[in-house]
Every structure is written in structure tokens, then in C-alpha cells.
Image (cartoon, helix red, strand yellow):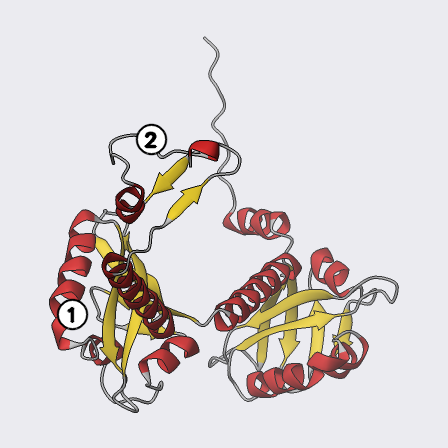
Amino acid sequence: MNRRSPTPPVEPESSLQGAIDAAQLGIFRWDRASGSIALRNDAAARLLGWERPQLTRAELLEQRVDRGHRDAASTAFDAAAAGSALSLRCRVRVWAEQPPRWLEFTAPAARAGDGGAAIGLIRDVSDEERERDLHRRYVDRLEASLAASRTGVWEFDLTTRDAYANDVMFEIAGASPHTPGPLGQVYWNQVYPDDMELHRSTIARAVEQRSHYRMEYRIRRLNDGAVRWVSSQGAVRCDDNGVPKWLVGTIVDITEQRATEQALLEEHERLQIALSTDPVGVFEIDIESGRRRWDPAMYRLYGVDPNVEPPVGNDF
């Protein structure tokens, strides 16, 4: 019977080196006192586009770090030279004909017995920075759209009671980020007393049902005491266990819209009263379909049975 030879144990150092190579991490040794940087593997040389095994801090800053990032890089290396950990993300220009890449330099803080030197890592974070830039642009466009439409945005943590609101939300409420008291409680206290039960029950039902809601209610602005009508839409967001965790939503000031709707309603009521007291009949004819509609006054004026189709053409 053949015996299988036991698999030799993997050496920790070779296993670590394999992981570093797979992640394409560059390794460097930095002397805090002299500023000398020794590139310890091929990945470090490749990431920096540096042929020699060593370079100085000055060479790194002046020949590789993008001009706009040199001050921040110099500050990070100064702090690390004084004993702090090195943590730096900056743009690096390796080849003149290629766009700059983003690199991350990290090294631990100084420790007793390290001889003033530190082993650090270099990592290409260009893809991460591109994603961050896309996200920032998306957020900027969203904020601009919300500001243009005068839409307030808010978020409320049901557990911690912490709240977030954008600038438009503060303007609608007549408040500011410096208004004393928890933001959520400040806004809750602004709900007009007669609408408080509607506000409370609507949100409580949405939380219980883990659903969306929409409602219109009044608030009293903090800065001038004015009563304003607002339209609010929101939704409940749950954690991984399905427990309601956040309320998120929008709010729009609809005071002028409500005033316009009320004026139109009152005008309609006045017109109905006038038509009911004066011998004036109203009719409608759809040109395409030929359908007719008479109001009761038309039937009375022409002595026509209200149960028959209104006459048209010569009969009319």
C-alpha cells in the first residue's frame, strides 16, 4: 500500500509574501532620521516607477508626488518622522504620458527598539479614488437638484434619536444647525398642535408596518412663528434583522400651493351659488365624441326632462 507523503507545512513568511504579492502591495523601509526610503520588493519599484532600490524623501516628493499634493505629503512625513504613524493618500506621476495614479503609504508609529526605522506598505488606490470621485459628483448633483426644487431631506435614527437634515430642511423649519436641542426633538416640537396626532399616528403606523407614508400637515417656524403647510414623504429602513432602524424622507413647503387651491375652491363655491340663484344654464359639448352635458338649470330653462339625453343640433 502506497503511503502519501505528508504535505510540508507552509512557512508563515512565504505565505505572507504570497499574500502581499497577490495584493500587489509594495514594501518599503523608511529611516525616519535620514529620510531614506528603501524599496524592498518589485511591486514597490513598479508602483513608483523607480529603477534604483533606494530614494530619498525629497526625491519622492519632488519627482513623484503630484504638485498639488506635495504640501499634504510633506506634512504627513513630518508627523511620521516625529514618531506618529504614516498614513497618506496622494496622486503620484510615474510617467509623463500617463495620467497620475493614487497611492497610499502606511507605516506604523515609532516603537522602542525599532532603531528609528519602519517597514511600510504602498498600495494603488486609484480605483477607490475614482469611485469616491464619482460618488462625490453624484452627491453634489443630488444636493443641487434638491436645493433647486426646494426639497428638504432628513434622516432619523430610531435607536439613537440622532437626526440629519440638509440646508433646505433647516430653511423650511426656520431653524439652523446651531439651534439648541436634539434636531429630531426640535422638529417634532414644531408640528402644529391640531396636526400632532395625525403626524404621530402616521409615523407610528409606518414604523409598525415597515412601510412608506405621505401626509400634509402644519408646522410653526422657529424663527418667525409663521404657520406653514408642508408635504412630507418618508420610509422606514430596517437593519439586517428586519428591525426598524431609520426613518428617511423629504419635506416640501406647500403653503402657497394650499392657498391657491383654497382660493380656487372658494371661487368654485361662489360660482355654484351664483348659478343656483340666477336663471343661467351651463352646458358642455365634446367636439370629438359629440357627448353633451347639461346642468339642472338648462333642463329647467328648456323644459326638458332631466332623464333624457340633452338635445343637440336643430333640436337644440
- Give the residue number, with chain letter if any, for mark 1: 195
Name the element at disc 2: loop
Looking at the image, residue 278 sits to the left or right of residue 5; the answer is: left
State the image coordinates of residue 259 (x, y, percent, origin top left). Answer: 33, 72
Farthest residue in the right direction? 97
The amino acid on which the numbered mark 1 sits, given as a three-letter code, is Asp
Q: Which of 68 and 108 is in front in this view?
A: 68
Q: For this rendering, which residue is in front, 31 or 206?
A: 206
Name the image quarter holding residue 138: bottom right
Front position in the image: 197 or 19: 197
Q: Report the mark closest to the observer, 1 or 2.
A: 2
Q: Is residue 87 visible?
A: yes
The N terminus sits in image quarter: top left
Residue 309: mark: 2
CA neighbours of label 1 inside 10 A, class few (<14), some (14 to 19), many (20+): few
Circle 2 residues within 10 Å: few <14, some 14–19, many ≥20: few
> Is 223 positioned to the left or the right of 145 in the image?
left
User: What's the residue at 52%, 38% (across, down)?
Assistant: 287
Vertical placement of 48 versus 227: above or below? above
1 and 2 marks in contact (CB < 8 Å): no
Q: Is residue 290 in view from this perspective? A: no
Q: Which residue lies furthest to the top in this view?
A: 1
